[in-house]
Amino acid sequence: MPSGSRDLKPYLANRQKRIDRALDGFLPKEKTRPSTIHKAMRYSLFAGGKRLRPILCLAAAEACGGSVREALPFACAMECIHTYSLVHDDLPSMDNDDFRRGRPTCHKVFGDGIAVLTGDALLTVAFEILSRAKPTTRYDVATLLREISVAAGSRKLIAGQVADLEAEGKRSDRATLRYIHENKTAAILTTSARLGAMSANADEKRLSAITKFGRALGLAFQVIDDILDVTQTTEKLGKSAGKDVAAQKATYPAIIGLNKSRAEAKRLTRNAHSALVIFGEKADPLHELANYLLEREY
Amino acid sequence: MPSGSRDLKPYLANRQKRIDRALDGFLPKEKTRPSTIHKAMRYSLFAGGKRLRPILCLAAAEACGGSVREALPFACAMECIHTYSLVHDDLPSMDNDDFRRGRPTCHKVFGDGIAVLTGDALLTVAFEILSRAKPTTRYDVATLLREISVAAGSRKLIAGQVADLEAEGKRSDRATLRYIHENKTAAILTTSARLGAMSANADEKRLSAITKFGRALGLAFQVIDDILDVTQTTEKLGKSAGKDVAAQKATYPAIIGLNKSRAEAKRLTRNAHSALVIFGEKADPLHELANYLLEREY
């Protein structure tokens, strides 16, 4: 397991730049009629996000011997889906969040109606981007389409959102919490990594290893997010801190405490590293990403 | 041009039944976890809709020598997209409608948050259904995916919704109104018909004829809808009548008056019929559908 000592920042900055450039090319220009929706889409998409999901997609492609260029459409599609889910999640009828990534949320700037449509448009454009991606011999467009639509659908991403809404104000058990994390967070992270592998035409063994990695990383990521909500300030998070507690959200610290939550995040991160053994050095960026996410905590 | 005298009801009933059965097969069962979302999806999807878009898709397939069976996944995908757009359109932050198809709207029954997610899930499942459809030699999955995602995206369906929202309370001109109708209504009707033709592997000439038909029919349909909002009761419409006037919506009767609107609907319906000449008798159901829609008015 690499030490994670290498400075990941230049790597991340490079990837963010390539992803941003590709997203800019895939999205309609701001002036495209009706400009309101295209402004709003870009406002939410270019809000200084970490680009974790698309970076994961690109790094998985490279671990499987593929190229950044071929993986980029998949990476961009997943970032659009992630951003759509945030825009809708922030709505007053959902989490009712006024800040995201340090800026007012979409509905605070454009109004609730346009924010609903902005989420809709970002979800839809993800599929338009997919229609421009190159399939491989093992993974045809239908397979790639099924991968994304199932991960973003009512039994995964949306299932997690629903369970999260329904858990509010109740005392949740650990199984419910795991269900929420697996669906609300890990499914999209896992699929981002899987699509990268698929863009590289990965064989079954490699795809399965990337899947295990993505799931462990996704779960670790959400545990850490829960911890940060308790331990960090709003300013540092760029979104309202302490919201989970205020909303009596189901979180790891609330159920098993802060120390056990930290141990769980470490355990999951170890699992993520272990899944990568077969890739050797090619998986270095994936190892480093896993460490980077874990270390956000401190 | 057929007289439209044949009773279309048994034909429509048969198609509705086949579409409903296929939709039932494509959608997760109500009990699937989390059941709230699957109940809500089915509540909105099986609410006694006319199934106009999927019926149009199937009839276009048959006009082009294709089969109902091969066209069904496309028909179902378009009905899911149509229903998603209604669920979001009815939200308090959009049109704020309490009734739809004679029943309380999704958010009135399940709450605003779940209604947002229900629309999201219906949009997403449309793409999952598409991933199970059979491509043809002329139209591969990528082409079909682009067709749907562009029609449902920010330059078509969502563009129409945005322009509609922005036109409220303003005095719109006829060009703006046409823009709204073309995007909010005609784009999805046109694509429904086009997908039917594509499922039948239609050549360029036939696809172009179906496209002209779909566009004219779509525009006629929306003019008639505007007229019905003025002339019919809430009970008869199954949704709140007079809402357009109350919300100072851009409508044909408001801009050019009721008589000229009726003449426009007839003119557009004539154009729809003309586009079908090359199909001969095979297009009889399409002719009859066009007449049926026009005659709703009286």
Image: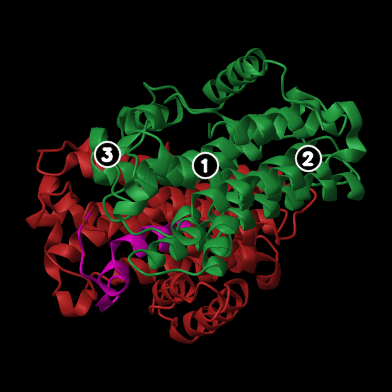
Chain colours: A green, B red
Q: Between B276 and A13, which is closer to the camera in this rendering?
A: A13
Query: In the rendering, at what x and y percent does residue A217 appear?
Result: 67, 44
Identify the secondary structure beneath mark 2. Answer: helix
Q: Which residue is mark 1?
A: A82
Left or right: A112 as drawn, with respect to A132? left
Q: Quick one: label 3 or label 1, which is nearer the N terminus?
A: 1
Residue type at numbered disc 2: His
Q: Residue at x 65, y 39 (%)?
A: A130
Query: In the rendering, at what x and y percent does residue A184 appear?
Result: 53, 54
Left or right: B156 as drawn, with respect to B254? right
Q: Nearer the viewer, mark 3 or mark 2?
A: 2
Membership of A22 in magenta stretch: no
Of all chains, the one bearing label 2 is: A
Are discs 3 and 1 both within one chain?
A: yes
Identify the secondary structure beneath mark 1. Answer: helix
Q: CA distance from mark 3 to mark 2?
A: 36 Å
Q: Which residue is mark 3?
A: A98
B5 is higher (above) or lower (below) than A289:
below
Q: Do residues under tags 2 and 1 come within 8 Å of each other at their CB atoms?
A: no
Q: CA distance from mark 2 to mark 1?
A: 24 Å
Q: CA distance from mark 3 to mark 1?
A: 18 Å
Disc number at residue A273?
A: 2
Membership of B113 in magenta stretch: yes
Question: Which image quadrant: the C terminus of chain B?
Answer: bottom left
Can residue B208 be seen in this snapshot?
no
B223 is higher (above) or lower (below) than A55:
below
Q: Residue at x 62, y 52 (%)?
A: A187
Which span is picked out in magenta?
A: B95-120
Disc number at residue B15?
A: none
Left or right: B124 as drawn, with respect to A272? left
A189 is higher (above) or lower (below) than A154:
above
Residue type at numbered disc 3: Asp
